[in-house]
């Protein structure tokens, strides 16, 4: 079946986003689904052949997409992260790449029999652990902040570094005068200086233009993206692949200028990046040649095993000695190294060129890199979450709850949930309200949740939902709007309000879901707490279900949340069915007890109040 260019592009976009959604729905790495889907529509059924369908535009499109992805990754690199992981990150982007290059080249030469020029190029390519794979995996796995910072910085910075190292080695052996090392180094220096000057200078100038209002809000994202692509192309005229450095530095500078609206800019770029990653991975895997892959021998497979199981862990372990990293962090970083689009693009360019020069083993470069990409994407995509969990480095707690606002009622709720084994975090910018919960062992955060400090002090993914329970309706809405992109709008809740500000009525998407019931507001909760109402836990059984509990509740009592057998809490949304099943515990707020005929009940909140 032959498709025209229009149908091919439309198919790539549709299948790519569909795979992303399916990965989210099934809680599977979307990168793995994209790779498998590309193999199905490409080599297996021959539905598309990207290099033939796109013709001369195939490589330029991939390069521009990678530049845009690196720019988006640069926006997410914050210097504040370096305060907690500076030495480790420094080692991973300086010493570790050189060790990976040397060890990888030695393995390629001695195991697979590749000539030294080809082995060195392969070693440089294995340095790359690009953001096209790392960022989607981090988004889904949600590691703790430090290990996530290690992998993110390494992936984004080493992506252009590895490509540049491969370019230098290639030009040294294949250039017009390979014996003149000085010319090669001078060419390298010119390219790096050009990349640094354009990336840093243009980033600062554009940031100043944003601050002075020279660019309207609706054009900030498009202008930044267009400039990133233009700078990438200009730098590549000086030194091939150096444009990747420019795009990365351009994003880093913009992301660290504390620009108003930078969060919206990052979300815009993240959407573009998801689309590009989806399409690029489909292009990559759909264009693989099964005959070339099938020609690989046992020495090639042994080399791939050595690169994954020996070279990478050894390089990371040596590089990070004395860097202040925990052994669990070093083990995780040493294991996780999925290769991405840049590795394939560099191999696709240099492999045939080296073969034309007659270097032994050059024809194996592209198949080796392609196989390395597929194996690491699948292997690390499925194992990252499990390995991180085993090492205690995950922060994801789907049933955990962040409660904003430490008043007597919310403090009582936090203590009740904590005693019930639910992961809960109580946050407030006043220490007075946090004293009692802290004494009872409830984790607390003292500070402003909307500040940059909170962004780096709170572990990403450490909580699964938010309950904004302050006495300020507008602030509650602002908190929900802030955390909605990270948690999902179905997991941000705020208390009901009698009078919603006019500005919030005009922007219905700004507010969170109304928690519990429409008629229960902040003042009502506080008043009933002082009247002696408390929090209760009632377990549902085969003989005592939710309907039995509802029939026996004291007058005015209200359901707050359900807790499953694993200690995961789910806040009740006003007007929605109560999601409680047999074996779960129900948290409710009311006066008096319930005669549940054997079901477990407690007065945890009242005890805390007394």
Image: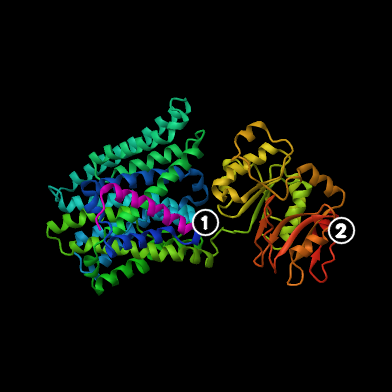
Reply yes or no: does residue 66 show up in magenta.
no
> Which mark identifies residue 142?
1
Residue in the foreground of this view, choosing between 33 and 316: 33
Q: Is residue 199 left or right of residue 48?
A: right
Residue in the foreground of this view, choosing between 394 and 375: 375
Residue in the foreground of this view, choosing between 238 and 269: 269
Q: Quadrant of the C terminus?
A: bottom right
Residue 93 visible at all = no
For label 2, the residue is 592
Residue 37 visible at all = yes
Q: Is residue 95 left or right of residue 538?
A: left
Looking at the rendering, the stretch of residues picked out in magenta corresponds to: 1-24
> Which mark identifies residue 512?
none
Provide residue 360's location: percent of width, then percent of height.
15, 64
- Going from N to C along the chain, the mark reached first, 2 or 1, is 1
Q: Secondary structure at mark 2?
A: loop
Residue 288: which quarter of the image?
A: bottom left
Provide residue 586's location: percent of width, then percent of height.
73, 61
Reply yes or no: does residue 23 show up in magenta.
yes
- Which colour assignment does the render follow? rainbow
């Amino acid at each position: 079946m032959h498709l025209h260019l229009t149908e091919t592009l439309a198919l790539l976009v549709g299948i790519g986003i569909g795979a992303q959604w399916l990965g989210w729905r099934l809680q599977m790495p979307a990168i793995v689904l994209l790779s498998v889907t590309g193999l199905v529509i490409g080599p297996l059924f021959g539905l598309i052949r990207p290099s033939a369908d796109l013709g001369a535009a195939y490589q330029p499109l991939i390069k521009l997409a990678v530049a845009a992805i690196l720019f988006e990754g640069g926006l997410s690199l914050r210097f504040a992260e370096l305060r907690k992981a500076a030495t480790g990150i420094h080692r991973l982007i300086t010493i570790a790449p050189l060790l990976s290059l040397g060890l990888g080249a030695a393995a390629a030469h001695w195991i697979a029999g590749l000539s030294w020029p080809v082995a060195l190029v392969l070693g440089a390519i294995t340095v790359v652990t690009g953001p096209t794979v790392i960022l989607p995996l981090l988004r889904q796995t949600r590691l703790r902040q430090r290990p996530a910072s290690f992998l993110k910085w390494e992936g984004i910075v080493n992506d252009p570094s590895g490509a540049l190292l491969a370019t230098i080695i290639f030009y040294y052996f294949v250039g017009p005068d390979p014996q003149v090392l000085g010319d090669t180094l001078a060419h390298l220096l010119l390219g790096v200086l050009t990349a640094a000057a354009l990336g840093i200078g243009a980033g600062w100038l554009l940031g100043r233009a944003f601050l002075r209002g020279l660019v309207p809000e609706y054009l900030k994202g498009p202008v930044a993206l267009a400039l990133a692509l233009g700078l990438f192309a200009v730098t590549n005229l000086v030194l091939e692949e150096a444009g990747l450095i420019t795009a990365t530095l351009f994003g880093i500078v913009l992301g660290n200028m504390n620009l108003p609206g930078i969060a919206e800019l990052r979300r815009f770029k993240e959407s573009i990046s998801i689309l590009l990653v989806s399409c690029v991975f489909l292009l990559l895997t759909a264009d693989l040649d099964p005959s070339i892959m099938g020609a690989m021998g046992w020495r090639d497979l042994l080399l791939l095993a050595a690169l994954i199981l020996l070279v990478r862990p050894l390089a990371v372990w040596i590089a990070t000695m004395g860097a202040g990293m925990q052994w669990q962090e070093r083990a995780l970083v040493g294991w996780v190294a999925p290769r991405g689009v840049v590795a394939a693009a560099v191999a696709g360019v240099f492999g045939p060129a080296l073969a034309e020069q007659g270097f032994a083993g050059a024809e194996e470069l592209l198949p080796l890199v392609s196989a390395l990409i597929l194996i690491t994407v699948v292997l690390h995509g499925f194992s990252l979450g499990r390995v991180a969990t085993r090492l205690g480095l995950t922060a994801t707690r789907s049933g955990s709850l962040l409660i904003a606002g430490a008043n007597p009622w919310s403090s009582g709720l936090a203590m009740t949930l904590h005693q019930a084994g639910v992961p809960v975090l109580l946050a407030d910018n006043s220490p007075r309200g946090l004293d009692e919960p802290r004494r009872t062992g409830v984790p607390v955060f003292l500070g402003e949740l909307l500040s940059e400090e909170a962004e780096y002090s709170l572990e990403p993914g450490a909580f699964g939902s938010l309950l904004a329970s302050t006495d300020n309706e507008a602030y509650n809405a602002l908190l929900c709007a802030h955390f909605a992109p990270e948690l999902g709008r179905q997991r941000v809740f705020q208390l009901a309000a009698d009078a919603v500000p006019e500005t919030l009525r005009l922007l219905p998407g700004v507010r969170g879901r109304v928690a519990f019931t429409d008629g229960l507001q902040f003042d009502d909760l506080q008043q009933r707490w002082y009247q002696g109402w408390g929090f209760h836990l009632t377990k549902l059984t085969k003989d005592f279900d939710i309907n039995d509990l509802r029939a026996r509740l004291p007058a005015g009592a209200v359901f707050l949340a359900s807790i499953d057998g694993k200690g995961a809490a789910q806040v009740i949304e006003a007007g929605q069915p109560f999601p409680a099943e047999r074996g779960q515990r129900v948290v409710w707020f009311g006066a008096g007890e319930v005669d549940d005929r054997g079901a477990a009940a407690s007065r945890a909140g009242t005890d805390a109040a007394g």
